[in-house]
Image (tube, rainbow, N blue to C red):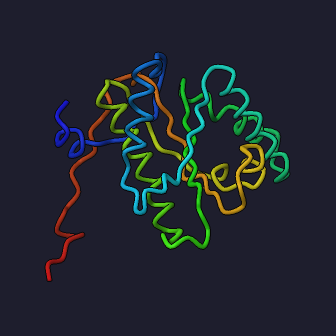
Amino acid sequence: MQALDLLLNRSSYNKLICPAPEGEQLTQILKAGMRAPDHGNLSPWQFIVFKDKGLNDLGEIYAEAAEQDALSADKIEKAKNMPSRAPLVIAVIAKVQAEHKIPEIEQVIAAGCCVQAMQMAAVAQGFQGIWRTGAYAYHPHVKKQFKLAEQDLIVGYLYLGTAENEAPIKPEKDLSAHLQYW
């Protein structure tokens, strides 16, 4: 797949089945994340890969967080099953160095760029995925279970797998509504 075609036709897709990327394919996805723009060369990110039993463990963490929030039994069960929507989930964490000369927002943006690069690397290899956040990207229990520092942020979960059906391409957006020349 040509890089420009990939970028101009990017679309998230959430109906994901096996197989998921593994071995060299997964390594290439993670390496693509490592090439994200990074002011100061801090590499302010961490990846946690969940597959197989790890998906169940992630679901348990989500369910515990839901229980802490006193959610209904149905919502706790839904939280527990969230990671099973794909055969592979990668949590991407911004490992923020507070009070560094590189502003914290730039460190977080760099970690966000990792997610984009990894999703594009997955699609380029024939897989599909979706970048998700939601309550469990911001929940203190999840951060604690991931052993994150106070200043660290979960910038998202990249759900990856094989598209169950042909992934639809989003309609092109009107560039002129988002563009100014000075």
Q: Position of residue 85 (x, y in %)?
A: 56, 30
Q: Position of residue 130 (x, y in %)?
A: 45, 39
Asked if residue 164 lies left or right of residue 91, the reply is left
Residue drawn at 72 percent across, 54 percent down = 139
In the displayed structure, 66 sits above or below 107; it is: above
The image quadrant where one finds the C terminus is bottom left
Asked if residue 84 lies left or right of residue 175, the reply is right
The image quadrant where one finds the N terminus is top left
Asked if residue 178 lies left or right of residue 156, the reply is left
Residue drawn at 40 percent across, 62 percent down = 39
Q: Position of residue 131 (x, y in %)?
A: 47, 44
In the displayed structure, 72 sits above or below 123; it is: below
Residue 78 placement: quadrant: top right
Could you tell me how many numbered marks the image carries?
A: 0
Q: Nearer the viewer, residue 116 or 11?
A: 116
Q: Nearer the viewer, residue 27 or 181?
A: 27
Residue drawn at 23 percent across, 48 percent down = 171
Asked if residue 137 lies left or right of residue 44, the reply is right
Residue 176 placement: quadrant: bottom left
Q: Nearer the viewer, residue 161 or 125?
A: 125
Residue drawn at 28 percent across, 44 percent down = 170
In the displayed structure, 171 sits above or below 182; it is: above
Q: Position of residue 91 (x, y in %)?
A: 57, 41
Q: Residue furthest bottom?
A: 182
In the displayed structure, 177 sits above or below 22; it is: below
